[in-house]
Amino acid sequence: MTNRTALVAGATGLVGNLLLKRLLASPVYARVVVVTRRSLGLTHPKLTEMVVEFKALDVLFANPAIRVDDAFCALGTTIRKAGSQPAFRRVDLDYVVNFAKAAKAAGAARFLLVSAIGSSARSSIFYSRVKGEAEEAVSALGFEATHIFQPGLIMGPRAERRPAEAAMMAATPFLNTLLVGPMKIYRGIPADTIAAAMVAAAASPAKGRLIHTYASMMQLAQG
């Protein structure tokens, strides 16, 4: 399958930025449409940028020129950055679901979502519960395939300073050797590996709801 159009949200983040680079370089995609709250400051012959408000993505529903094949969502924040639990929920649940609905209306057959390990709509942990609620809401929209990526610690340089996370990343190569068997799903994983796995999964003929954790992401990324 070639000459496809990808729709991307979250391209300013760590995984999303690397994902965008891979999509633009891929011979599979003739067009990459990015919805973003602020301009990327990037030009590319394949790239179409739409600066939008995620709380009002009706513009995608109303625009028949936007027809896509695959939708990639790497939206996400932290409670610290968002400033409160309601603000975090707005980004990691409401914006994700709004984007998924817009992607569905634009014809997307596949939806690929970056979530987190331990996500569950029934979790007692707020972060994990919101992530799980987003997964369930997106899955209920009826895409031909919904790929959910559940990484542990995402490794890579971030624009904002996260001292605790940086310390964890420094220890990750050692910690990963201790996480074996069922615990392997908690291993730290490079952001670009997640991005590569997402692009590979989009090319898969698999249908339904598919959950990808450490092992399957590594396998997808390695081809």
Image (spheres, rainbow, N blue to C red):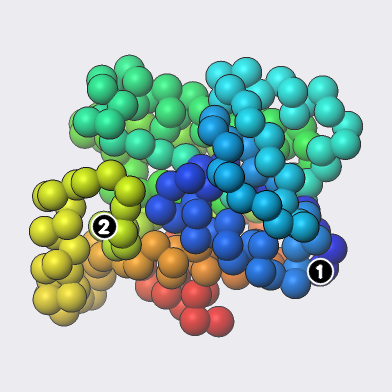
Horizontal placement of 206 versus 85: left or right?
right
x, y percent for residue 218: 42, 75
Decide which of 206, 155 is in the foreground and name it. 155
- Please tell me which of labels 1 and 2 falls first in the chain: 1
Query: Is 171 situated above or below 108?
Result: below
**Residue hosting label 1:** 1
Q: CA distance from mark 1 to mark 2?
A: 32 Å
Horizontal placement of 20 versus 76: left or right?
right
Q: Quadrant of residue 23?
A: bottom right
Query: Is 153 situated above or below 121?
Result: below
x, y percent for residue 178: 12, 75
Q: Residue at left 77%, top 57%?
A: 45
As shown in the figure, which amino acid type bears the numbered disc 2? Leu
Disc 1 packing (10 Å; few <14; some 14–19; many ≥20): few
Horizontal placement of 13 versus 199: left or right?
left
Q: Residue furthest right?
A: 64
**Residue hosting label 2:** 153
